[in-house]
Amino acid sequence: MQDKILIIALGNDLLGDDGLGIVASAILRERLHDIIEIEDVFGGGLELLDLIEGKDKVLILDSIQTGTNEIGTIMEIDPEKLSAFQAYSPHYIGLPDVLRLGKELNVKLPEIIKILCMEIPFSEEIKQGLSLKIKEKLPEFCKMAEQIIRQWGLDYYIRLERF
C-alpha cells in the first residue's frame, strides 16, 4: 500500500514573498502531474490539523522571517525544533501549536513531517509577485522539494525539462 503523502503550501500571495509556497506549489503541480496531493493554505491555523490528519508523510512549503539568515537561504526545519525559531508568521496559530494540539486530541498525525522554507525579508506591504532574489532561488527550492519526495520512495514521472 502506498503512503498517503501531502504537500502543503503555506503563504499569502497578496503579501509578495510570503506567497513563495503558493508559487512553488504551482510549479510542483506541473512537475508531479497530480500524482501527489498538493494543498494551498492561505491562512494556516487549525485548517492544517484537518489536512494532515491521517496522512503518512507531509511536506510543508513556506517562507520564514527570522531576520538572522541571508535572504533566500533555504532551510529544512524539523517541526519539533520549529518553536526555537523566533519568526514572524501571518498564519495565525503556528505549526508547533497545531501539532501540540493534535497530540493532545489524539489525532492521527503523520509519521513524517518536513518543513522546507526560505528566508524572506520582513514586509507587510500588499503586493503580488515575488522579489527578484526569491524568484532566483525558486528553482532550487522546488528541486529540494522534489528531492524530499523522491527520498520518500515515490515512483512517478517527472518531465525532463529543467525548471
Image (tube, rainbow, N blue to C red):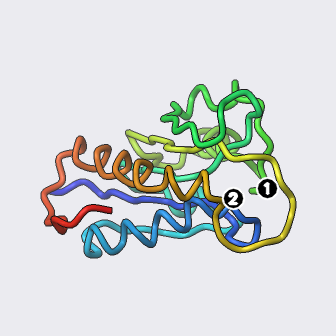
103 in relation to 135, above or below: above
Residue at image coords 53%, 68%:
23
Tell me the amino acid under the disc marked 2.
Asp
Residue sitting nearer the eye, 111 or 33:
33
Tell me the amino acid under the disc marked 1.
Pro
Q: CA distance from mark 2 to mark 1?
A: 9 Å
Q: Residues within 10 Å of mark 2 (few under 14, many from 20)?
A: many
Asked if the residue under mark 1 is in contact with the one under mark 2, i.e. CB atoms within 8 Å, the reply is yes
- Quarter of the image that includes the C terminus: bottom left
Residue sitting nearer the eye, 91 or 143:
143
Q: Secondary structure at mark 1?
A: loop
Residue sitting nearer the eye, 100 or 85:
85
- Quarter of the image that includes the N terminus: bottom left
Q: Secondary structure at mark 2?
A: helix
Left or right, 101 with respect to 36, comes to: right
Residue 10 locus on image (x, y percent): 60, 60
Mark 2 or mark 1, whichever is nearer to me = 2
**What residue did someone put label 1 on?**
90
Residue at image coords 55%, 60%:
21
58 in relation to 66, above or below: below
Which numbered disc, 2 or 1, marks the residue that appears first in the sequence? Answer: 2
134 in relation to 39, above or below: above
Residue at image coords 30%, 58%:
4
Label placed on residue 18: 2
Determine which quarter of the picture holds residue 92.
bottom right
Residue 38 locus on image (x, y percent): 42, 68
Residue at image coords 76%, 37%:
87
Residue 24 locus on image (x, y percent): 48, 63
Determine which quarter of the picture holds residue 29.
bottom left
